[in-house]
Amino acid sequence: QVQLAESGGGLVQAGGSLRLSCVASGLTFSSYAMAWFRQAPGKEREFVAAVSWGGGSTYYADSAKGRFTISRDNDKSAVALQMISLKPEDTAVYYCAAGLLGYSDPDYWGQGTQVTVSS
């Protein structure tokens, strides 16, 4: 059974930082591209960042560029999202996702972790 377990969400003031983590189990982690998506209240889920199977390539939404950094540790079956200079508009539930053929159509999703940025 595949599980993606996110952690690290919370409440932070605008300008602050958070680091989200996702630990995977039940799959060959290094075979999957990993990504973070988010969903704000009343909005559709949107792509935030992704990292390739070996970690050599990363991809970011325009809203994340320069502020968020995605990384992975295949030995620990983990992916992280370091977020700095957080804005109230970053408030959302953040989801970890794994895609065998890429990040755009994930096969597995975590249950999400809430990030709230106060102004």
Image: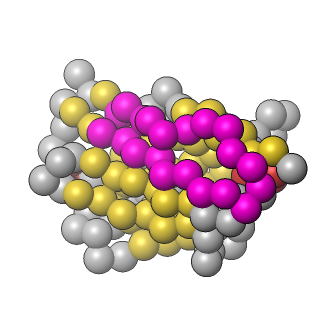
Pick whichever, 86 or 49, lies toward us: 86
> Where does residue 16 sit, x and y in percent of width and height?
67, 57
Name the residue at 30% across, 39% down: 23
Q: Quadrant of the N terminus?
A: top left
Pick whichever, 108 or 82, lies toward us: 82
Q: How are the residues colored? A: secondary structure
Asked if residue 9 is among those painted magenta in the image, a careful observer would answer yes
Location of residue 48 by image quarter? bottom right
Number of numbered markers: 0
Q: Is residue 65 left or right of residue 56?
A: right
Q: Main secondary structure of the magenta part?
A: strand
Name the residue at 23% across, 57% down: 73
Asked if residue 37 is among those painted magenta in the image, a careful observer would answer no
> Where does residue 79 sit, x and y in percent of width and height?
34, 52
Compared to 13, does 66 lie above or below?
below
Name the residue at 35% across, 33% down: 4
> Where does residue 9 sit, x and y in percent of width and height?
55, 38
Pick whichever, 49 or 78, lies toward us: 78
In the displayed orientation, state which residue is furthest to the top: 1
Q: Is residue 114 left or right of residue 95?
A: right
Q: Can the viewer see residue 21 in this picture?
A: yes
Q: Is residue 119 left or right of residue 58?
A: right
Compared to 40, does 89 lie above or below?
below
> Where does residue 59 sit, x and y in percent of width and height?
49, 71
Magenta-tinted stretch:
4-23
Q: Is residue 68 left or right of residue 11?
A: left
Q: Can the viewer see residue 107 in this picture?
A: no
